Image (cartoon, rainbow, N blue to C red):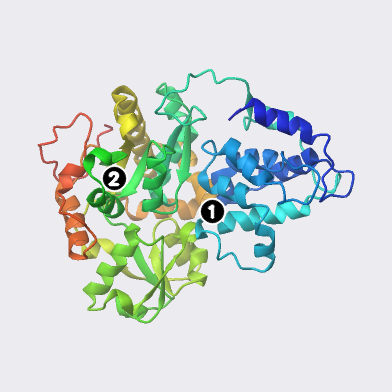
Amino acid sequence: MYISAELQEAFEESKTTIACFGDGEMTVADHCLQVATAIHYNKSPTVQLYKRDLVVMAIYHDAWVREGPPGKDGHGEHAFHHLSGRLHPHVTQVLRDHTQMEAAVRLKDLSEFPISIRGLMSFFDKIDRQTTHKNGWPQLPLQFFVEAGYLTFGTSPRPFENWMSLNSTLVWAAPSMWIERTPVLLAQKLGLFESFGLPPVEVRISDGGPELLAMVARGEAHVGEIGLFPFAKYASQTPIEKRACSLVGSTFIQQLDHYLVGPPGSTAGVTALKGKRVGILSDGSCDSYLLTAALNSAGLGKDTVTTVPLGAHYGKTGALMMVDGAFLVEPSLSQAEEQGQASVLIKASTLFPKFQWGALFASNTLQKQEKHLQQILAVYAEACYLMHQAVSGQAPHILDKVLSLGPDCFDVAPEIFQKALLRDIGTWQLSWKNVDYQGADVCVDIMQKLGELEQPLVAKDLFNVPGVDHDSSQGYGHNMSRL
């Protein structure tokens, strides 16, 4: 990430500023580098997802501290101003609030903060409070972080364009972290975007569909994946000329590969959750609508359960300690089964066998760059093809790279990740062009019946698939072509 002159100057000054919260010998720069070093060596999947941004934030989080107690000089807000738009919004929010969160963490009451950042807040606060002695923790020099690729001083060699981020990168956004992210993560690992002449890609998880669409509206995301439910609601609320993006194809998870689970040994189907607490990603996210549909199928109303927004905890086995049931997706489902933590109550696709679940979106700005958008979609197609070849045994030289994503990104062992990939490989849609418009109509119809759409929609009008005649109907199928 390219660092501004203001950030550089603030850090240089912090080298001679004794930290008022330290041992009297530690400078602010010592403290910042100790925090950054601890994050650099942390191997947890949550930190891996945000690592670059967390490290950069740590290096500059106290750069404007002067004399006086932390929090009195607005230094978090000052650093936030300089890094906003360059780091993930969750990370910059932690930066802005880090001087106010210590008391909340100590009291174990983070209710005033969004659930999407509470895990990051607790993680950062613990390190921030512990690194108060000059020689107390390992401390890598600033030059290490430059050589490791976290920081770059000077001007980007790639001219900034309005379809890139302020970091001269392409931001691929998605509402949650599950198996649907595998192609883009594999493309990153294999360097496919760069091989197509594209800028480096940052993957940003928004913790919800409405939250993702807000990121796009702010210009913080350019392309990625989203579910049909939140996008349909967004489209019904927003005139087409004011929408920040449109759908450009299908993700490889085209069907509803979502599994509603309950406590281990549950055998009563959806009715096992009556009167229980059920986890969802966020209010208005896809699974909140799926839950209502599942309850209706069993003759139950949505008020028969209490929904709990899980945010960053969604889809993870640890969330099952917070609720009685939830939708699980792979690889967390295979992990939960392996650990005896849950039983499948219903697979969502049994409710709606014909369904266009996930879609690729592109911002209006990126869609004007037709060549670049076609390249991005070609990378996605190539990654899907290589993933399928590897998991089906036809490309063993790629399999290790695919399976390494299990521990690196999802906190599951390679063998669990392989089991997860194999569970639904037969229904993967490997051609992003092959949108199931009839299945998309099913989604829109569900939303209309639930009273969630402010105006009628035609599903096909939500899509603008490059290179495909908009008036031609793409039938449902599993096209194994690479494009």
Q: Position of residue 106 (x, y in %)?
A: 69, 65
Q: Position of residue 295 (x, y in %)?
A: 27, 73
The amino acid marked with disc number 2 is Ala
Residue 154 higher or lower than 56, as above or below: above
**Residue at image coords 26%, 31%:** 483
Residue 260 higher or lower than 167, as above or below: below
Q: Dot 2 lies on which element?
A: strand
Q: Is residue 33 visible?
A: yes
Q: Which residue is mark 1?
A: 411
Q: Is residue 477 left or right of residue 10?
A: left
**Residue at image coords 34%, 30%:** 366
Q: Is residue 465 left or right of residue 151?
A: left
The first of marks 1 and 2 along the sequence is: 2
Q: Which mark's residue is nearer the viewer, 1 or 2?
A: 2
**Residue at image coords 51%, 45%:** 89
Q: Which residue is mark 2?
A: 359
Residue 346 higher or lower than 314, as above or below: below
Pick whichever, 399 or 453, lies toward us.
453
Q: Which mark is residue 219?
A: none
For residue 198, which quarter of the picture?
top left
